[in-house]
Structure formats: C-alpha cells, structure tokens
Image (cartoon, rainbow, N blue to C red):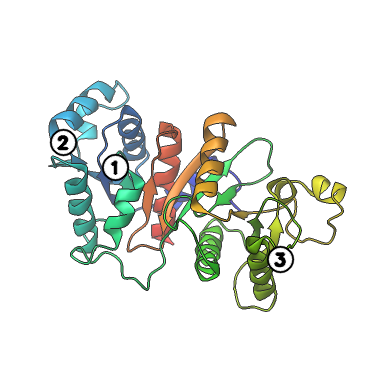
C-alpha cells in the first residue's frame, strides 16, 4: 500500500522504467508553481510536455525558472508550446489533442476547474459522453493521519444524488486500488453519525452503506453517515458510543455530501493544516492532474506523478 507521496513518486518512476516520459498536455501554465512542477517532472523522467497557452508569457516564466540544475537545452527537449490567446482556446486544443491520442495525460494548470469540466462534455470536442462519470479526487497526506486520505468529489459533481455518490465511490475505490489499497474503506460524511429522517442526507448515506454491504457497490467497504472526527479517529468514535464500525478511524476515502464541502475540506487541509496533496480528474479519456490556487509546486508534481501512475495502470 502506498502511504505517502514519496512512495507514490517512486512508484510512478518505476512504472516508467525503460520507457520515455508520458506525453502531457499542460493547460494554461501561467504561474511559476506550474512551471517549477513541470520542470521537476521532466527532470524525473515522468513526462514530455506540450504547453498550451500564451507563448510569450510561458517562455518568460520558463526563462525565469530555469536554473543551473535545469539547463535550457535539457528543458526544451520535447517541450512544445502551442500559442493560445485564451484559457478556453488552450483547453479546447489540449482536449482535442488528447482525444486524437496525441497525449497520454493532461494537467489543468491556470484554467478554472469548472470551465474545464464544462468542456469535458462538449459534444464538439467529444472528449467524454454523458454516460461516463467523471469525478475529482483529492489525495492528502498529513502527519497526524497514518495514511493517505482520498476526498471526493470537490470539483465536478455539485450536488450528487445517491446514484452519483455510487459513481464517486466507485471511481475513488478504483484510484485506491492503483495506490495498492486492497480493500479501501470509505466514510460517507455528514454533520453527525446518527440516522435521522429529518436529515435526508443521513438516510441516503445509510442506504448506500447497506447497498455496499450487499455487494451493490463493489471494491470498497462503506460506512455512513459518519462525522469527520469519527472518520479519522477510532477514539472519537468510541467516545461517542459508535462501536463496530469497520471504517471509523481507518478511513481511506472521504465522501462529503456536496462538492462545496469536499472542496472546502481539501483546501482547508492544504492551506491551513499544511497537508501535502495531489488532485486528479478521474474517469476521463486520459487522467487529468489538477492544480488549484492553494497548491504548491510540490503538490502539482504529486498530481502529475499520480496521473502517470493511473495512466500506466
């Protein structure tokens, strides 16, 4: 089981042993953190980038970022810049290139995630069909928790119903398997662990947990509703009188009730709690690494490595 990002990056390199780096399309790399992460990924042999965005701005950032450890000749090997005037144009060109099989993975850099998500289902591009469920999964590492935490969905499905939550669970479980978690444990989060008819989400989550018990949601052990403190601490579960939960205190996958809640958990963990992180849009034609405004270059590199590992799996 992969328990931290150092192991994850090592596994990504091992998966590519003897191979060239994967072809990555980078959408709007207009922040120094984007460029730094891309250069590190190139230096690690993980990727061969094509950058989609304003060429003058990108070249300037590259010139500023290249140091003695990244000779300019080395950096420019296989690195192409496709000049795009707008974020929409950059995303469309990158998606079309991936659709044609010219790219193995993508990195959403400076473009707002919501705008990219809308383009994923654009019929003119043909990148994803309505029957395909695409979800965002944030992966977190914090020194107060004993393993990686997967949080979903913080960027794609705004108000998931029970059917959408089944897909969120399935995608997250699939990613957990890539991380070598044999039987991932998922907590369906709510404000409290009780089941109350007056709180519809608690009823829905209890039903989903029972469906998982009966094998209707495969590859994952599910419990809910659970409050966040119970999900991360068996001691808290015991203090609240919740016994017998196979998930409490050992959760791999955290599924908040809405996108807003999931997004808030991810950003609070990264920005205020100092968690190391990665993000991926999962279930699309190719894995899409994500970079949010709170992510450091290290987190972006983690996202790239995660997408490489998924693509190779």
SS category of the residue bearing label 3: loop
Q: Position of residue 251 (x, y in %)?
A: 68, 53
Quarter of the image containing the N terminus?
bottom right
Q: Which of the two discs, 2 and 3, labels the residue nearer the N terminus?
A: 2
Task: Tell which tag, 2 or 1, sits nearer the viewer.
Answer: 1
Q: Residues within 10 Å of mark 2 (few under 14, many from 20)?
A: some
Residue at 40%, 52% (x, y): give it.
Answer: 307
Q: Position of residue 63 (x, y in %)?
A: 21, 24
| Number of the label disc, if any, that sits on residue 111 | 1
| Number of the label disc, if any, that sits on residue 292 | none
SS category of the residue bearing label 1: loop
Q: Which of the two discs, 2 and 1, labels the residue nearer the N terminus?
A: 2
Q: Are marks 3 and 1 in contact (CB under 8 Å)?
A: no
Which residue is more in the foreground, 122 or 197? 197
Residue at 59%, 73% (x, y): give it.
Answer: 218
Question: Is 307 placed left or right of 262 in the picture?
Answer: left
Q: Position of residue 256 (x, y in %)?
A: 58, 53
Residue at 64%, 59% (x, y): give it.
Answer: 186
The residue that disc 2 covers is 54
Q: Position of residue 58 (x, y in %)?
A: 20, 32
The residue that disc 3 covers is 197
Task: Tell which tag, 3 or 1, sits nearer the viewer.
Answer: 3
Question: Is 219 placed left or right of 214 in the picture?
Answer: left
Residue at 85%, 58% (x, y): give it.
Answer: 243
């Amino acid at each position: 089981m992969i328990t931290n990002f150092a192991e994850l990056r090592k596994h990504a390199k091992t998966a590519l042993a003897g191979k060239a780096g994967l072809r990555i399309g980078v959408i709007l790399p207009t922040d120094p953190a984007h460029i730094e992460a891309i250069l590190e990924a190139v230096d690690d042999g993980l990727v061969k980038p094509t950058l989609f965005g304003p060429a003058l701005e990108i070249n300037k950032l590259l010139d500023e970022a290249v140091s003695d450890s990244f000779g300019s000749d080395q950096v420019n090997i296989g690195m192409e810049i496709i000049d795009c005037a707008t974020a929409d144009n950059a995303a469309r060109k990158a998606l079309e290139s991936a659709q044609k099989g010219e790219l193995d993975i993508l990195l959403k850099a400076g473009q707002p995630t919501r705008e990219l998500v809308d383009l994923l289902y654009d019929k003119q591009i043909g990148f994803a069909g309505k029957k395909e469920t695409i979800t965002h999964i944030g992966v977190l590492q914090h020194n107060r928790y004993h393993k990686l935490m997967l949080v979903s969905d913080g960027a794609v499905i705004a108000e998931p119903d029970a059917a959408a939550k089944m897909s969120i669970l399935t995608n997250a479980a699939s990613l957990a398997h890539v991380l070598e978690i044999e039987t991932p444990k998922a907590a369906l989060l709510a404000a409290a662990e009780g089941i109350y008819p007056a709180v519809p989400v608690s009823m829905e989550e209890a039903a989903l947990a029972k469906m998982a018990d009966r094998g209707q949601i495969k590859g994952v052990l599910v419990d809910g509703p659970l409050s966040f403190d119970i999900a991360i601490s068996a001691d808290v579960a015991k203090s609240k009188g919740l016994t017998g939960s196979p998930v409490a205190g050992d959760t791999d996958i955290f599924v908040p009730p809405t996108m807003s809640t999931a997004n808030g958990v991810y950003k609070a963990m990264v920005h205020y709690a100092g968690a190391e992180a990665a993000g991926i849009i999962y279930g699309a034609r190719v894995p899409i690494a994500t970079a949010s405004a709170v992510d450091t270059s290290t987190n972006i590199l983690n996202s790239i490595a995660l997408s490489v590992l998924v693509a190779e799996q």
